[in-house]
Amino acid sequence: MRRSTQWMIRASYITSVLFGVTSLCYVENTGEVYTKPLVTIYSALANMAMLALVPHFQHLDYNAHSLPVLTNSLIFVLKAVGSIITVIINWTNRGVFVKTLNDLASIRCKFMRRWPLSDKIKEKFETILRRKLLLGFITLAAIMLSSIEYIQTQLKIESFYAILPAIMVNCIINMVIMNYFLCITHLNVLLWAINEELEKILKSTYQLWHLRIMGQIGLGTWITQCCRLSDNLDELAVAQHHLHLLGNRINRMYDTQTACVLVMVYLNNLSMIYMSYPTTQKAKLFDEFSSWALVVMPILMILYYIDLVFFVRGMIEFEESFVATSKLLRERKLLYPALDVRLEESFKNFSLQLAKFPVEMKLVGLFKFDRSMAFSIFGSTISNAIVLIQYDYKNNSDE
């Protein structure tokens, strides 16, 4: 891994600590997580400072007739609720976080000792990390700068010491999502490696069968090689099952925050599409903000959506990696011949494991999240925005 990538990972961890998102320390070389009194105390103080912002929520205009103002208020409240939920989860499930992250580091180290990552997977892993972290930091900085003016105009806050907690509220969810992305990407890398090793086993089985048919290997070599492949396949199946269980634990750790993000995305889409249509409310709203804020906002939204696409892709790839494994095993039944009884049993057990323990990304344990749901969210947003634009156009024409 390049040094600049390591620096970005360190910067992500330091930022999480500064914003009070995490109160844990980690060993960079091994990934081991542990608690430290000084970091714990700082995190507790940062969380209490954030809660001091709650009384200012009464300044928000919850009955505004302007849709952008109302959606922005709701988004800010959702960010605050998500931040409070994050604080509660971080402290009540602290032991679960430590155990889960340590299990992830342990499984990763054991797996890579047994099956070192190929150069192709290493390059893909680093590219994804660098792209997401760099874009995440740029988006975070843009949110911090643009939120200052919003906080001053909507929350009627002027004091720097009160603005700071409000900025933290705006950024905490982004930091939580970045941490979740790092966890799920580490799982995805191991799943890619499993599929790569499975492809090698399938290729070896075909070559072995071909050599056996041609009479180039004896029965003893045949059985020995089949047993070796069977052992490797069983180990891969066990490793994938552990990753499946670990992925479920990680998703449960972040499912509430992810649900909040999707609701905020929905409201953002609704507001942005509505704002693209020229209205009197839009002109009045723009008068409240400075020219530099109006320039930054479109750029911020573009970066926000690009960052969101990378995040959603990381979530979906976790499930799609299991689908790819299942596809490889199905193709083996169709394309590859029968082999040794033990090796056939290993293939069968791996297929049954995937069928018995299907992977589903669920939000708050209720809603299944996949590619179709992501498209449904955007489709529903566009439909609702069109209805609101038509309603606004009718009212303006009547006037």
Image: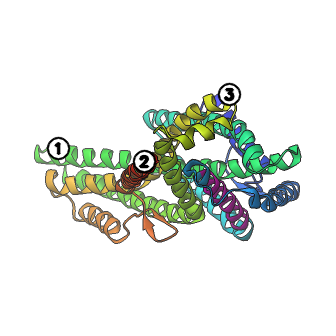
The answer to which of marks 1 and 3 sits earlier in the sequence is 1
54 vs 249, nearest the viewer: 54
Q: Earlier in the sequence, mark 2 or mark 1?
A: 1
Three-letter residue code for mark 3? Trp
Q: Give how far apart the Cα atoms at labels 3 and 2 are.
A: 27 Å
**Residue named by callout 1:** 211
| Magenta stretch in the rendered image | 72-90
Measured as percent of width and height from the top left, residue 130 is found at: 57, 34
Q: Nearer the viewer, mark 3 or mark 2?
A: 2
For the residues bearing labels 1 and 3, Cβ distance under 8 angstroms = no
What is the crowding at mark 2: few (fewer than 14 residues within 10 Å), some, or many (at least 20)?
some
Q: Residue 291, how many percent across, how many down?
A: 67, 28
Residues 238 and 91: in front is 91
Given residues 98 and 375, the one toward you in this image is 375
Q: Which residue is mark 2?
A: 389
Residues under labels 1 and 3: Cα distance? Answer: 71 Å
Q: Residue furthest front?
A: 399
Whether residue 25 is situated above or below residue 251 in the rendered picture: above
Q: Nearer the viewer, mark 1 or mark 3?
A: 3
Q: Quadrant of residue 355?
A: bottom left
Kind of residue at disc 1: Leu
Q: Residue at x 62, y 31 (%)?
A: 294
Which residue lies under the disc numbered 3?
292
